[in-house]
């Protein structure tokens, strides 16, 4: 009977003490960053649901000893938080739609077409981001008062879109630049027009960049405060950023209700980002592979 030689399994490699210490240190730093990131959210939520007397005790406790949901109930019963969040959602959706649509054509003209002064116009477009909002808010306020667009979320959406559009055009232009020239030229040779090339070839390839533009526009409109505070004074038309600020008064600031409102204010953009996350990651991965 033939003998079978069985070679012994190689012994597992032992980690050197230095590499083990580096791994432990890496996870300690990672855990610390997670705690630093999550703790403010945890503190916001627990403070919102604690009794007011417990929030005033010193030293404060990390764990709530009892729960009190009355501030949250009063927030919806007596306040306008629901209306404010709906207004912010409408405003951000309008700004996102305007910016995505305008950025598509603006980026296409800057990236795909050759015309005199293209580089100068692109730089000028980016330089508009250097203008502070406070510099032009007075003339915009007067113009909106004259044409009757004050107290209007639709009018406010035009202002927000105008301010965030240049950066959206530049982000999308850089994505359009990654589309191979040969692909576009082949489509033109086959008889496709510029619009067909844009919508059937360029946009499907650069979809992650288009989503990134939408996320940038949505977050800008959701968090914008100065124009919203100046243009909107009607309680029923306020976006959430202005509504939360109006809860802070000199005589009484209901900290529990304010933190509960702040937590609710953060939920829609987080959900929007989670929904778009896979497209954003795909865009980052594609850029890394091409680069």
Image: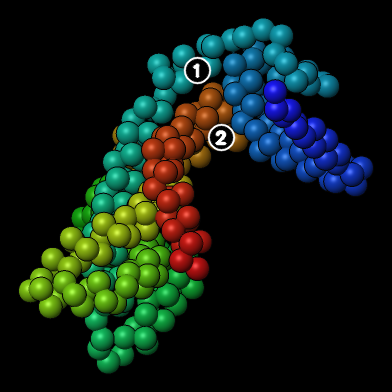
User: Mark 1 packing: few (<14 Cα in 10 Å), some, or many (20+)?
Assistant: some
* Left or right: residue 94 compared with residue 272: left
Point out residue 80 in the picture as x, y percentages from the top left corner: 38, 27
Point out residue 211 in the picture as x, y percentages from the top left corner: 35, 52
* Left or right: residue 123 compared with residue 40: left
Residue at the far front: name it.
1
* Left or right: residue 151 compared with residue 12: left
Q: Label 2 to label 1, Cα distance in Å?
A: 19 Å
Q: Between residue 283 and residue 183, name the one nearer to us.
A: 183
Residue at the far bottom: name it.
116
Q: Residue at x 50, y 17 (%)?
A: 72
Taking the image as drawn, is residue 240 in sight? Answer: no
Q: Between residue 179 and residue 103, name the one nearer to us.
A: 179
Point out residue 219 in the picture as x, y percentages from the top left corner: 43, 48
* For residue 176, above or below residue 150: below
Of the image marks 2 and 1, the number of the one nearer the N terminus: 1
Look at mark 2 in the image and give the residue it sits on. 249
Q: Secondary structure at mark 2?
A: loop
Point out residue 158 in the picture as x, y percentages from the top left corner: 28, 58
* Left or right: residue 181 compared with residue 175: left
Counting labels gives 2
* For residue 106, above or below residue 238: below
| C-beta proximity under 8 Å, tags 2 and 1 | no
Q: Residue at x 31, y 51 (%)?
A: 96
């Amino acid at each position: 009977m033939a003998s079978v030689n069985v070679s012994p399994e190689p012994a597992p490699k032992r980690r050197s003490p230095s590499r083990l210490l580096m791994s432990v240190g890496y996870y300690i730093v990672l855990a610390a960053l997670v705690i630093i990131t999550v703790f403010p959210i945890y503190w916001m939520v627990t403070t919102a649901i604690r009794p007011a007397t417990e929030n005033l005790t010193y030293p404060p406790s990390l764990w709530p000893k009892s729960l009190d949901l009355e501030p949250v109930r009063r927030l919806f019963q007596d306040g306008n938080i629901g209306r404010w969040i709906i207004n912010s959602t409408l405003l951000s959706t309008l700004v996102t739609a305007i910016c995505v649509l305008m950025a598509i054509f603006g980026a296409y003209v800057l990236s795909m077409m050759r015309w005199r002064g293209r580089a100068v116009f692109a730089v000028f477009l980016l330089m508009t981001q250097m203008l502070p909002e406070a510099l032009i808010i007075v003339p915009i306020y007067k113009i909106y008062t004259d044409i009757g667009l004050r107290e209007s979320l639709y009018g406010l959406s035009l202002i927000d879109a105008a301010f965030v559009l240049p950066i959206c055009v530049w982000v999308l232009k850089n994505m359009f630049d990654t589309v191979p020239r040969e692909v576009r030229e082949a489509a033109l040779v086959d008889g496709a027009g510029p619009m067909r090339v844009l919508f059937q070839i360029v946009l499907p390839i650069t979809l992650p960049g288009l989503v990134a533009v939408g996320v940038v526009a949505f977050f800008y409109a959701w968090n914008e405060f100065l124009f919203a505070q100046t243009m909107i004074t009607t309680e029923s038309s306020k976006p959430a950023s202005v509504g939360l600020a109006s809860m802070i008064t000199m005589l009484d600031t209901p900290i529990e209700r304010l933190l509960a409102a702040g937590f609710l204010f953060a939920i829609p953009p987080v959900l929007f980002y989670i929904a778009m996350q896979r497209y954003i990651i795909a865009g980052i991965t594609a850029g890394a592979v091409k680069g």
